[in-house]
Structures are given as structure tokens and as C-alpha cells.
Image: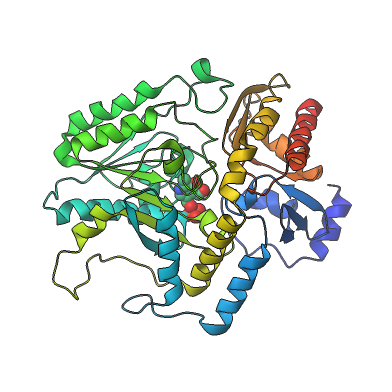
Amino acid sequence: MTDNTVRQITSALPDLESYWMPFTGNRYFKQNPRMISRAEGMHCYTTEGKKLLDAVAGLWCCNAGHCHPKIVEAIKSQAEVLDYSMAFQLGHPKAFELANRLTEIAPDGIDYAFFVNSGSEAVDTALKMALAYHRTRGEGSRTRLIGREKGYHGVGFGGISVGGLSPNRKMFGSMLPGVDHLPHTHNLEHNAFSRGLPQWGAHLADELENIIALHDASNVAAVIIEPIAGSAGVLLPPEGYLKRIREICDKHGVLLIFDEVICGFGRTGDSFGAARFGVTPDLMTTAKGLTSGTVPMGAVLASKHIYDTFMTGPEGAIEFFHGYTYSGHPLAAAAGVATMDVYQGEGLFDRAREMEEHFADALHSLKGEPNVIDVRNFGLIGAVELQGIEGQPTARAMSIFRECFDNGVIIRTTGDTLAFSPPLIISKAEIETVIESVRTALRAQ
Ligand SMILES: Cc1ncc(COP(=O)(O)O)c(C=O)c1O
């Protein structure tokens, strides 16, 4: 962008100083604002009217495409009749309806939904559920939580403690005590350019046995992992890895939590990663695609045995001292129900599965382009890892991001990896446009 263009855009904008933006280089952004003011289907439009093909569904969330008319209508209608009702001790029908819709598409045995407002809240809620579950059963010594290196579980204190991304942890002190981490499964030496799940690495699950042995199972509450780690740059579970983790948890009475905030709602070509991988956890955290990104909402989906364990005290007494003012908010619940209607009515989970091969072919055609050291794909998630510029981590990926943006395509970067998670409505022609834009940017470096 030239200085002149920046001046033209910024003159039409409010003063940018007061907003402290999340996960953003504030000073750079305010000098070089990229502002989106409208979106529809596969596209976003900047304040100056530039049309952009969205290859990341907002932030892995607008799975039904932007501003889907049925979801928009449901939110409007709900706002007219019920803005809010007390979330504790009172209910409203849409929240119950949405809980039913979610448990219908969840794997068998996952029969309950607890509503929150984000993925981070879902994670902290699930961790608290796991601790309280063991205590309620008389095993209160089970307090240790196990996450995984390179895992991302949001930004609450629970989430960063079990998370495994150093920049998200290092500034925030000692966090939760009693947390361990499994090794991550990313290995280019063995798995570079794998199509779908990598073959090497299931044995890395066995490290869980060692961690549990070190502390004794009687002190371990839960393991939390993403079926596919998204924010760390799309790290795929090696074939057989998740099943092995499930077996070890079962053997030791340790709960398994799948963080499905990215993997849920069609991203893997099925309702949830759990369904696609055939491994059922005890708890699942969800958000993002739950309302197709329209209204903030998350949910913890819980198995019947967990819910039943809590339902033992005197009737009328609160069983779980946890919840948010906006748990099950009417607008979010209405958006969620309409989103489930759209996913099912338009067969979007199947569509994602049908597109998977084409998406994989397109992504893997980038092998051999300058500085491409790996390509990963599964469902409608993809990643292209780049050789970083020596001494300037993230700079190469950022330059590709900017070039693609200037050429009309939004992609995401994490470290020196380019990540792709398009709305599930993406067409083959749009996949070509995304990939060719990346190819052009790679060649232009
Ligand atoms: C796996 C996972 N868990 C949790 C979160 C946090 O969600 P939120 O940003 O809605 O708090 C994210 C966000 O990207 C995520 O990818």
C-alpha cells in the first residue's frame, strides 16, 4: 500500500489509537490498517471495497460461509423477542434445543452440553469438570492435568497451562500447578509431505504411560489434546496415535478431553474430529463453528457418565458451581440452532469430505515451489510450511500473507507456516484461486 492509499483509508476511519488489539502488532497495524467492513459467503470486503476470498473462514469459524441468510434471520428474530434471560435457575427454550441438536451429532455416549462463550472458556470449564468429577467420585487426589507441546487451548489460565506454545505462556508466571506435557508429534524428517495422516509417530502416545507412571495414576485427572492441532500450524495425529492415547487413559482411569474448537463442525469432513477418527473422548470442547462465527459461543460436550456422576447430591442443590452470565445466551443459541440447520440442510460436513481429495491435490501441488518444506492436509484443513529466513522467524510467512492479501486472498500464518481452513462451501475454482495466489506469492519472493 502506498502512503497515499493509507491516508485515504484512514481518513474514512475512526481514530485507531484506543483499541488495544488482540494477538496483533498494534503499532504496525495502526500504520497499515487492513479493515474488513462487510462479508458474504466466501468473501470479505475491505472498507475501501476490495474483495477478498476468505481461505480461513474468519478465524477457523465461519464454516457455513459469511452472513448466511438463514443464520442472520434467526439472530434478528431472536433479538426481537428475547434479548436475555437469567442463565442461572431460569432457562429459555433455544438453549435446550441447541443442546439437543449438538448431542444428536456428537459421538454416541456424549449426551450433555454445557454452554460458555468461547473456546478458552470451554477449555477452562472442561478442566474444572474433570477435577470436580474425580473429587465427586471420592478420588480428589486426581488433580494433575496433561496437555501437549505445541497445543493451543485458548488464553485462560487453564488453557495456557495445558497449552504448549511458549510465547503464549512465558509472560504469565507459574500458571496452574501440576501440569505436564506430552511430546508433540510434528516430525518433518519422517513425515514431510504426507497426504492425510502421517504414518510415523503413533508410538509417541506411549510417553503418556511414562508421565502417568511418574506421578501415579491416582494423581492424574485428565489429558487434553486437539485431535488436529490447528494454531500451532496444523499438526496431524499420526495414524493410530489417538486410539493409543484413549487406551492408555482408559487403563488408568484418566479422562480424555478433545479440544474440538477447530476440528468441530465439519472441518475434518465429519461432525467432530472424534467422529472422523473413531475415538470418543469423555469431554469435548467446542466453539467457533458452533454458530459459524456469528455470535460468540462455546460448549463443553460431556459424556453421560460424567454428567451422572455430578447428579448425586440432594435434588435442588447446585451440582457444579460454574457458569457464565451469558451461558446459553438467546442470540447465540438461536444462531447455533440455525447453524445446525444449515450444516444439515446443506450437507456441509459431507461436502467437506467430498472436497478433501481435491483440496489435498491442490495443496500438494505446491511441493517444489520455493522454500516449501512441507505440505499437510486433512478434511478442509491444510498447511504449507516454509523454510524461515535466517534470523527473521515468521518474516517469510508474513510476506506471503501480505502478498496474498494484496492479490485478493486471505490466508493465515503461524510461525513460518501458512494455514488454510476455508468455509465448507468453498468451490473447486475457489480452491484453485487460493492455491495459485500462494504459488504466485512464493515465486515472487
Ligand atoms: C483448539 C483451540 N482451543 C481453544 C481456542 C480458544 O478459542 P477462543 O479464541 O474462542 O477463546 C482455540 C482458538 O483458536 C483453539 O484453536
Give above or below for 330 relative to 284.
Answer: below
Q: Image quarter for residue 74?
A: bottom right
Q: Position of residue 337 (x, y in %)?
A: 51, 65
Work out whether 237 lies above or below 270.
Answer: above
Placement of 44 over or under 295, stated as above or below: above
Quarter of the image for the C terminus: give it: top right
Q: x, y (%) of residue 221?
A: 23, 44
Name which quarter of the figure residue 164 lies in. Answer: top left
Camera-side residue of 413 and 136: 136
Residue at coordinates 38% horizontally, 52% vertically from top-left?
A: 123
Q: Residue 168: tell me if it is visible.
A: yes
- Examine the rendered structure and indicate whether residue 245 appears above or below residue 91: above
Where residue 287 sits in the image (x, y, percent)? 48, 55
Q: Nearer the viewer, residue 440 or 164?
A: 440
Q: Which residue is pictured at 79% across the width and 26% down the height?
A: 443
Instruction: Measuring from the top left, give residue 284's x and y in whole percent.
Output: 38, 49
